[in-house]
Image (tube, helix red, strand yellow):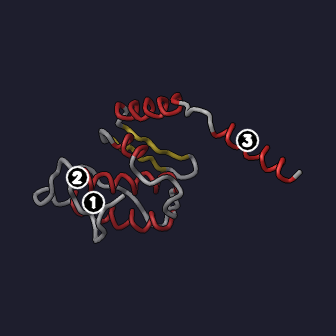
Amino acid sequence: MKHLLYIVLLVSLIAFNCNTPKKVTNTNTNERLENLKDNDTVKISSDKVEYEIIIIEPGYNYWLASTARPEGFYSQQFMENRNYQYVVEWNNRVLQPNRFDPNLYELQIDYRPGIDYGYEVNYKLYNYFIYFQLKYKQRLGPFTPRI
């Protein structure tokens, strides 16, 4: 009786695992990623706190969806600490257009350490800094930008 149960379990496992992979999901994922290439604006806003972040960077949405670490990989506190350091350096570079490319560093970022911007804002801002550093071969702090 035990052998029959094992055989039935084995046959059912084989039967369920013999399905061919569905290419529809992969196609949908690829189409979604391709659509992100065309959409180069990320807008994040909240009713809880009066803030708005608009990131206009060709390729950033695609990179965020295809290359960046997934949400939940980093803690909010980790990203807040890094974002603050990156923002300080970014704003210093905005104020020195003769030393740093003003086409790269156009506007200051108003990011205050005492405000809880939430996970999503910190995640997208942190990943933008990583993307920016990798794409433009810049270094905004003591940390080597990596994925």
Residue behind mark 3: 11
Q: Secondary structure at mark 3?
A: helix
Q: Position of residue 52 (x, y in %)?
A: 44, 46
Q: Position of residue 48 (x, y in %)?
A: 58, 51
Left of 137 or right of it: where is 128?
right
The answer to whether residue 3 is above or below residue 86 is above
Q: Residues within 10 Å of mark 3 (few under 14, many from 20)?
A: few
- The disc, 1 or 2, on the residue closer to the chain's N-terminal end is 1
Query: Which is more foreground, mark 1 or mark 3?
Result: 3
Left of 82 or right of it: where is 132?
left
For the point 33% across and 63% down, which residue is it?
Answer: 86
Q: Which mark is residue 105?
A: 2
Q: Are marks 1 and 3 in contact (CB under 8 Å)?
A: no
Q: Secondary structure at mark 1?
A: helix
Of all residues, the one furthest to the left in this rendering is: 98
Q: Are marks 1 and 2 in contact (CB under 8 Å)?
A: yes
Q: Closest to the observer: 3 or 132?
A: 3
Q: Closest to the observer: 87 or 35?
A: 35
Dividing the picture into quadrants, the one containing residue 20 is: top right
Q: Closest to the observer: 62 or 104?
A: 62
